[in-house]
Amino acid sequence: MIHLKSLSKRHRSGDVETTALDRVDLQIEAGEYLAITGPSGCGKTTLLSLLGLLDRPSDGEYWFDGRELSRCTERELALLRRGQIGFVFQSFNLIDELSVEENVGLALDHAGLPAREQRQRIAGALDRLGLAHRARHRPSQLSGGQQQRVAIARAIVRRPSLLLADEPTGNLDSAQGQEVMRLLRELNDEGTTLVMVTHSPTHAALAPRSVRLLDGRVLVDALAA
């Protein structure tokens, strides 16, 4: 599904250039569950942003479903991102002026779906996440775990083939974190490719494969024992 070849990302501020990722080679098969770990500043979030087409690499190749993306226009990347990639963030990124169902429905903007199908998809995602009874509530009326489940519903309502999760349990207590990890594993078991950035060794150990970064490079790429 994904093949990175010598992928690098550099940031420049004035005369200072910083290398966030340095010639990363990585292959991710369809349906895989991969954890990305490493200390702060090692390039984890940068790698996730590149995988999610939120940023472009400085050098190297990114192959997605057999297509090399370096020459794609921003519009082509946006269409690919909206059509096949879902995002779950640590900070939830919900809009409190909107209801739960309206927050989830934002992901279907510009999807070109009939209104009836949009409503069905939103209702289905909320029911799947156990939130149907909270559809008209505001995010501020929910617990942290419920807010993260809303964020997951928003990420999956388009039925993406790739789900990217950046510290999805970082703002949750242990019980809420375990519930979110269970939901993510269920989605992976159903065929969604899952790539998760985490600082938690416990949560990283739940993934069948783990990649550890250090100073922008892949230090370890190993299957679970």
Image: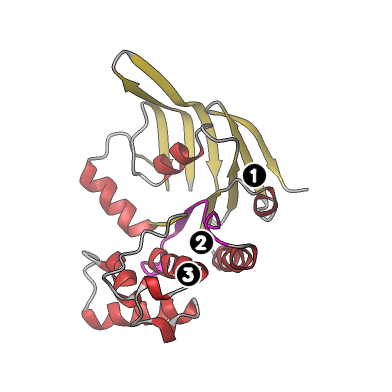
Residue 91 rendering spot, x and y as whole percentages: 43, 55
Cα separation between marks 3 and 2:
17 Å
**Main SS of residues in magenta:** loop
Residue 183 rendering spot, x and y as whole percentages: 57, 68
Asked which secondary structure carries label 3, the reply is: helix
Write the start and end of the magenta stretch as one range: 156-172
Question: Which of pointers 1 and 3 lies earlier in the amino acid sequence?
Answer: 3
Q: Residue at x 23, y 42 (%)?
A: 74
Q: Residue at x 28, y 67 (%)?
A: 106
Query: Crowding at label 3, few (<14), some or many (≥20) Cα neighbours within 10 Å?
Result: many
Label 2 belongs to which residue? 192
Residue 49 rendering spot, x and y as whole percentages: 40, 42
Label 3 belongs to which residue? 149
The reply to whether the C-beta atoms of the residues labelled 3 and 2 are less than 8 Å apart is no
The disc placed on residue 89 is: none
Question: Which of pointers 3 and 2 lies earlier in the amino acid sequence?
Answer: 3
- Left/right placement of residue 84 relative to residue 175 reads left
Q: Residue at x 21, y 69 (%)?
A: 112
Asked which secondary structure carries label 2, the reply is: loop
Question: Is residue 171 highlighted in magenta?
Answer: yes
- Vertical relation: 27 (above or below) 154: above
Query: Crowding at label 1, few (<14), some or many (≥20) Cα neighbours within 10 Å?
Result: many
